[in-house]
Every structure is written in C-alpha cells, then in structure tokens.
Amino acid sequence: MLRWFLVIFLALMLISWLSPLLRRMGFGRLPGDLRFRWLGRDWDVPLASTLLLSFVASLLAKWL
C-alpha cells in the first residue's frame, strides 16, 4: 500500500511540474474544461484535457 501512495505522489508531482508546459500547448483550454471562481480562488477542472491525455497514454502503453 505504501508503494501505491508513493506512485500517486510522484504522479501528482510530475503533473504539477508539467502543468505550465501543457497549458502553453493548449491543454486546460479545450471545450469541456471548466474554469470558475469560488471563494476568491480560481478553480480549474480539466475534464476534456484529462480524457485526451489518458487516451494518448493508453495508446502509448498499447504500442510500446
């Protein structure tokens, strides 16, 4: 179980580091990505971007 926590932690760190690069490439601004302001903070819910990235990752995993 500790191994899964470590994998999830590392994946979240990688996503947070790559977030500015992905945003410059257009991810997070696709139709279907939600952005709203609540409690004085901007919130992003990248639904379409998450689906697209998971599709690309599954294709890469299947081919490699």
Image: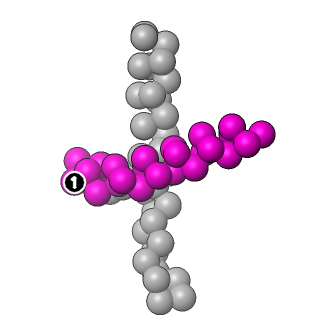
Give how far across and how far down residue 62 sits, in percent: 49, 13
User: What is the magenta range?
Assistant: 1-27
Q: Which amino acid does label 1 sit on?
A: Arg
Give how far across and how far down residue 57 sits, in percent: 45, 28
Residue 48 in view (yes/no) = no
Looking at the image, residue 55 lies above or below residue 23: above
Looking at the image, residue 20 lies above or below residue 50: below
Q: Is residue 18 left or right of residue 11?
A: left
Give how far across and how far down residue 19 sits, in percent: 35, 54
State the residue at coordinates (47%, 72%): 43
- Total numbered badges shown on the rendered structure: 1
Looking at the image, residue 54 lies above or below residue 10: above
Give how far across and how far down residue 3 sits, in percent: 69, 37
Q: In which quarter of the image is the N terminus?
A: top right
Q: Residue furthest right?
A: 1
Residue 2 in view (yes/no) = yes
Q: Which residue lies furthest to the bottom in this view?
A: 40
- Dominant secondary structure, magenta: helix
